[in-house]
């Protein structure tokens, strides 16, 4: 595997998984804020469905979207199958329940008095919502990073929706699968270590940046 | 003093999650501008719920609550504006992550004040609560008392029209508590702030407030506090008692612990002439006394003051003075049912944390 191909696979992984984590978080965090701040009939069922979805195997999500995006599927006309966009969409749906679940837990752990205090000090409901998010920023970041880690390390969705096309949709995990199938275990292990280093590096960068800004220990 | 800040009519509130356990019902309540009102009552009396209603954090389930002559719940924006005039300081205040100064400045930034004004107000407020120079410190690791003072400073920095305080000195030691009382009184005087605070401490209420609202089980309690006693409560599970003096027990039903303030309505005390040295009849709440003063409160009723182990005031029909041979300096027996004793203040027995 030449360096250029390797660099492209890393780029595909970072791009598709990063986008998936950002888009999923943009949906999941407001949903979690709503769920954590309100009690309504059917809330337990919503949480149960989310937990079940969280445990869905990646190949099941891949298969679902494959059937939707394949030529004969209802969304076949969009021509998205075997593109990076399809990989991103699949990964969004894969990690969405995970980010909702982790964000919900993070926001539930923020003291309920935080919102009340913001309100009594003159904040509007929207401002108070932002305050709650700010108070939970570190655990929320963990939720987003967990989603990113899940997306960048999965292989089922990337393989089924991306097709592992060289210099197009091949990413780190599908490269590892390919190298292993070819008997090139050394390449597979190197790619695996690279995947871990990338995830570790992003974690360190983001957490250090946040702590430095907030002066938290 | 100006007009009314709050006007409540038949206001009720019940928590949706626990409808059977508690509801607040107040026929009417008017709070004048610039006044200091104390809310006194045992745990679960409804003091915090009333403060939350006055802070517009809870919306009345029924009745009418007016703030400065208007209904604050007409729109979300109206409620936000009303909240900016009435700031609540909770019993266990929440401090946002960050520095003390950032916390004190929070409400000022929400109100979009200019930075120099914010800096000056933060410094002033921190000086008032004796935290000068602490602004740059993180709130992590503050003691309960320091956190309470930071929260008081955060509320004072806003110079609000109404300051609502839920047991404001609960986490402070006695000396600092008294100094904070002076700060709150001064704030009221200087800025014309109306202060409403809850307390278990009957003497604090009497010391600070222009008027006192007694609450019990979500209702206003009307009584004359002529017979008011405080002490540490003991209980056997069915009844409890305090000893205002060693060996002198006032018994009341239910379970109570900690420092308790209770009152007995003068009309609930029975008074009969007795021979000195005679045996006391059996039963709780029987006391010996001597009539030290008698006066008429209306054409039919007399108020009798007795001295003895405890000083009591009892009211009885004037004709009963003659038939009962009650006269000045007469030895008397005073009795009242345990159910006549009304607990108006109850502070848990937990140790106070130092500030």
Image: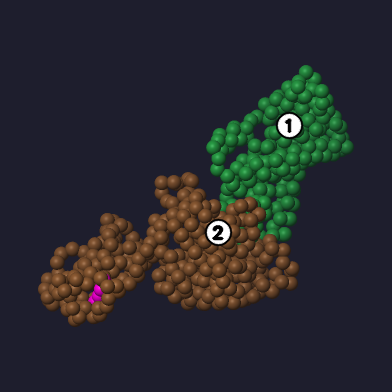
* In front: label 1 or label 2: 2
Return the x and y of residue B42 as percentages of the image width and height. Answer: 39, 61
Residue A149, by quadrant, is top right
Q: Nearer the viewer, residue A155 or B153?
A: B153
Chain bearing tag 1 is A
Disc 1, disc 2: CB below 8 Å? no
Judged from this view, the residue extending furthest toward the top is A72
Tell me, what colour scheme is on the image? by chain
Q: Is residue B170 visible?
A: no
Q: Is residue A204 visible?
A: yes
Return the x and y of residue B5 as percentages of the image width and height. Answer: 55, 65
Residue B303 lies in magenta, yes or no?
A: yes
Q: Which residue is mark 1?
A: A90
Spatial separation of the CA atoms under disc 1 and disc 2: 54 Å
The answer to whether B72 is drawn above or below residue A39 in the figure is below
Residue B298 lies in magenta, yes or no?
A: no
Residue A161, by quadrant, is top right
Residues in magenta, as a range: B301-306
Give the drawing colour for chain A.
green
Q: Which residue is mark 2?
A: B66
Q: Nearer the viewer, residue A25 or B340?
A: B340
Q: Main secondary structure of the magenta part?
A: strand
Q: Nearer the viewer, residue B139 or B168?
A: B168
Give the drawing colour for chain B.
brown
């Amino acid at each position: 595997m030449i360096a250029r191909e390797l660099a492209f696979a890393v780029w595909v992984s970072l791009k598709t998984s990063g986008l998936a984590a950002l888009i999923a978080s943009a949906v999941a965090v407001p949903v979690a804020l709503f769920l954590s701040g309100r009690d309504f009939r059917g809330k337990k069922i919503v949480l149960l469905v989310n937990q079940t979805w969280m445990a869905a195997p990646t190949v099941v999500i891949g298969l679902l979207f494959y059937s939707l995006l394949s030529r004969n599927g209802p969304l076949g006309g969009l021509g998205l199958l075997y593109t990076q966009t399809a990989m991103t969409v699949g990964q969004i749906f894969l990690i969405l329940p995970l980010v909702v679940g982790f964000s919900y837990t993070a926001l539930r752990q923020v003291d309920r008095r935080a919102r009340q205090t913001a309100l009594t000090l003159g904040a509007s409901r929207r401002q108070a919502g932002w305050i709650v998010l700010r108070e939970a920023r570190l655990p929320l970041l963990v939720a987003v990073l967990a989603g990113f880690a899940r997306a960048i390390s999965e292989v089922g969705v990337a393989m089924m929706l991306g097709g592992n096309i060289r210099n197009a949709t091949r990413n780190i995990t599908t490269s590892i699968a390919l190298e292993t199938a070819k008997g090139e275990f050394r390449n597979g292990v190197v790619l695996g270590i690279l995947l871990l280093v990338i995830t570790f590096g992003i974690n360190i960068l983001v957490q250090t940046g946040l702590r430095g800004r907030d002066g938290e220990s | 003093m100006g007009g009314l800040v709050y006007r409540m009519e038949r206001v009720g509130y019940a928590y949706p999650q626990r409808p059977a356990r508690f509801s607040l019902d107040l026929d009417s309540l008017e709070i004048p501008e610039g006044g200091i009102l104390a809310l006194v009552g045992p745990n679960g009396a409804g003091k915090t719920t009333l403060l939350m209603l006055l802070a517009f954090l809870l919306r009345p389930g029924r009745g009418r609550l007016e703030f400065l002559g208007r209904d604050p719940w007409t729109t979300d924006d109206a409620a936000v504006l009303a909240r900016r005039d009435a700031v609540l300081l909770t019993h266990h205040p929440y401090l946002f992550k960050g520095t003390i100064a950032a916390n004190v400045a929070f409400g000022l930034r929400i109100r979009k004040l200019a930075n120099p004004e914010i800096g000056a107000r933060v410094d002033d407020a921190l000086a008032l609560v004796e935290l000068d120079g602490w602004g740059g410190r993180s709130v992590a690791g503050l003691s309960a008392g320091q956190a309470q003072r930071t929260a008081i400073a955060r509320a004072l920095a806003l110079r609000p029209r109404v300051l609502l305080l839920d047991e404001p000195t609960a986490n402070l030691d006695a000396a600092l508590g008294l100094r904070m009382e002076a700060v709150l009184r001064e704030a009221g005087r200087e800025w014309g702030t109306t202060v409403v605070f809850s307390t278990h401490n009957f003497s604090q209420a009497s010391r600070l407030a222009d008027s006192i609202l007694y609450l019990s089980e979500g209702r206003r309690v009307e009584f004359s506090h002529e017979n008011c006693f405080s002490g540490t409560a003991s209980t056997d599970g069915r009844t409890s008692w305090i000893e205002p003096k060693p060996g002198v027990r006032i018994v009341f039903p239910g379970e109570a612990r900690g420092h308790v303030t209770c009152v007995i309505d003068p009309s609930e005390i029975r008074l009969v002439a007795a021979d000195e040295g005679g045996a006391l009849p059996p039963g709780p709440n029987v006391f010996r006394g001597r009539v030290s003063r008698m006066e008429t409160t209306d054409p039919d009723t007399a108020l009798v003051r007795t001295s003895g182990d405890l000083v009591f005031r009892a009211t009885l029909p004037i004709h009963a003075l003659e038939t009962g041979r009650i006269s000045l300096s007469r030895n008397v027996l005073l009795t009242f049912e345990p159910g006549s004793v009304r607990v108006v203040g109850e502070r848990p027995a937990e140790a106070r944390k130092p500030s």
